[in-house]
Image: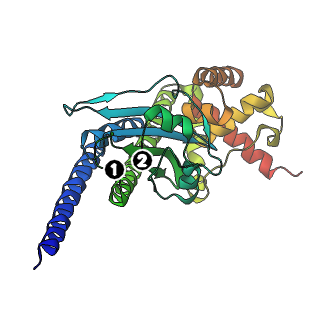
Amino acid sequence: MTEASAARLRDAQGADDRCARALGAVLDALACTRTETTPADVIAAAPRQLCASGVFDRVMFSSVRGSLWSPQALYCRGLDGQVSLELDAVLEDADIALSSPLVEAEVVRRRLPALVNDALGEPRAYAPLVRWMNCRDYVVAPLVAMSTVVGLLHADRMVGAPPVAAMDRDLLRLFAEGVGVAYERALLSQRAEQQRDAVAEVCADAIRALADPGETLALATDFGLAAAAKRAAPQPVCGSDVRESGRMSRLTAREREVLALLASGATNSQLADRLTVAESTVKSHVKHILHKLAVGNRAAAIACYLRETRSDERRPR
């Protein structure tokens, strides 16, 4: 074997060793991120853990909302190995359009990572960000959860360190995909907990209703509809679709809409999101509904709504 061949072999072996170490570090960072239990905590931990892995010197997370992306957190790793959070006012709360020909727009559209070798000379790079970070090259990958791009991860190394390469792009992609799965799991767990709370609230209302003879009949009516509900879950009915008869006529159109959503099983937070109001406003609506229907709890109000809605459906038009 010639000396040149031996040198190439040593270089290849060295590259393999570096790749193996980097892969192990990224997987460790992902494992730490996956221990978080809420979507917000997963997003907060991801760039910090990746930066602390030592594979990259700087990692930035940006949120993606519609056609805009906005830098949210930038972590830097010092010579002592310590990781610090840094984000300049120039970039904080900046909304950047995901428009062609930006690299980030292509990353979001294709949902694939990208490697930018000459950041200062790349016309598709976002110039203010490149100048502020003084980066020569970087990799960027999308965070995808529930088939939606929820964020971007940018990563690079400081001047003097080896430039990022295709291997780094692939490692970032691996990490971002793992974070997306962790985010989905946390989101589904959060939704399941909200549904459990909603069921517990309805059950508590039902138990309280049993202690009130005046509500027992309404509660029994609600239970009588349970079999039908198993066959076809009740869908929200717009207030305008409910005839203004009986106690329902006492409600405003907005209150009937709120009651319809309550009957579909929506929680206060889901109602607030659907109606684009604060939860306190939802609670106020519910309070007025209970007062106007002369009932003591949500279960009785829902029973009243279902009873009158069923009567309207059977009544000849």
- Residue visible at 64% across and 49% down in the picture: 234
Kindly give the residue lying farthest to the front in the view shown.
3
Element assignment for label 2: loop
Please tell me the numbered disc located at residue 163: 1
210 relative to 276 in the view: left or right: left
Picture coordinates of residue 246, whole percent (x, y): 79, 32
Picture coordinates of residue 175, whole percent (x, y): 34, 52
Where does label 2 land, which residue? 137
Element assignment for label 1: loop
| Above or below for 97 versus 210 | below
In front: 174, or 294?
Answer: 174
Disc 2 residue type (three-letter): Asp
195 relative to 220 in the view: left or right: left
| Above or below for 77 versus 120 | above
- The answer to whether residue 217 of the structure is visible from this angle is no
Q: Which of marks 1 and 2 is nearer the N terminus?
A: 2
